[in-house]
Image (tube, rainbow, N blue to C red):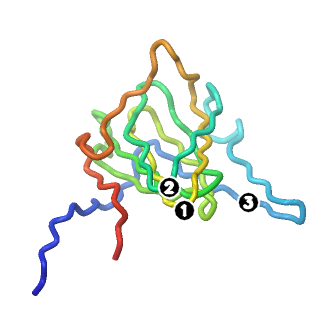
Amino acid sequence: MAVKNTKFKQPPSTPIDGVVIQPLRVVPDERGRLMEIMRRDDPFFTGFGQVYLSTVYPGVVKAWHYHRIQDDRFTCVRGMVKAVLYDDREGSGTRGALNVVYVGEYNPALIVIPAGVYHGWKCVSDYEAYVINVPSEPYNRTDPDEFRVDPHEGGIPYDWARQDG
C-alpha cells in the first residue's frame, strides 16, 4: 500500500537577479593552504563596512533575514552550510525564486547577496561551521539594517528539514 507523501517539496531553483556565487580556489602546498576570498578588483566589490565571523552549530538554522541597504558577501571556511536565498523584492524579475547553495570546506565559494534578498543557512556538517561575512556596510547598533522572519513559520516557502531519498 502506497502512502501519500504530503510533505512540502522544494520548488526548482531559479538564479536570483544580483546574486553571485563565486567559486574559490584553494592552493595547497607543503606548508598548508591559501584561499583568496575577495579582492577589491572583483566586479562585485563595492567597498566594505566590516568583516566578521559567525558560527553555527550542527543542525542549527540561522534564518531568515534581509537588509534594505547592505549587501552581504560570505563564505564558510570551516564545516559546511546549506545557504538558502529567497527573492521577495517588489519589481524583481526573479521574485519568488529560491537558491540553495552548499558552501564550505568541500565546496569553497563566496556568495554575494544583494540588499532585499532573504537569506540564512543551516550547518550540515558534524561540527561547528565558521562563516566569514564582508558586508558592504558597518553594523549600525542604534538603527540596524536587519529585518527578520521566523525560519520555519515566516511565510517563506522553504522546508529546512534534511531532504533524504
Residue under the image location 46 percent in, 36 percent down: 114
Quick check: 152 left or right of 40? left
Query: Alpha-carbon distance for marks 2 and 3?
Result: 24 Å
Give the quarter of the figure containing the C terminus: bottom left
Nearest to N terminus: mark 1 or mark 2 = 2
- Nearer to me, 126 or 139: 126
The crowding category of the residue bearing disc 1, from other C-alpha atoms within 10 Å (few below 14, some 14 to 19, many at least 20), is few
Read off the residue under disc 1: 126
- Mark 1 and mark 2: Cα distance apart in space: 6 Å
| Image quarter hosting the N terminus | bottom left
Secondary structure category for the residue under label 1: loop
Residue found 28% across the figure and 46% down from its top: 152
Q: Which residue is mark 3?
A: 26
Q: Residues within 10 Å of mark 3 (few under 14, many from 20)?
A: few
- Amino acid type assigned to the residue bearing label 2 in the image: Pro
In the image, residue 4 lies at what x, y percent? 12, 74
Q: Nearer the viewer, mark 3 or mark 1?
A: 1
Taking the image as shown, residue 58 lies to the left or right of residue 34, namely left
Q: Position of residue 14 (x, y in %)?
A: 35, 55
Q: Nearer the viewer, residue 9 or 90?
A: 9
Q: Position of residue 9 (x, y in %)?
A: 24, 63
Q: CA distance from mark 3 to mark 1?
A: 22 Å
Image location (x, y in percent) of residue 24:
66, 55
Q: Earlier in the sequence, mark 3 or mark 1?
A: 3
Location of mark 2 (residue)? 58
Q: Amino acid at mark 1?
A: Asp
Cβ atoms at labels 3 and 1 below 8 Å apart: no
The foreground one among 125 and 31 is: 125
Count up the numbered dots.
3
Name of the residue lying farthest toward the left? 1
Secondary structure under the numbered disc 3 in the rendered image: strand
Q: Residues within 10 Å of mark 2 (few under 14, many from 20)?
A: some
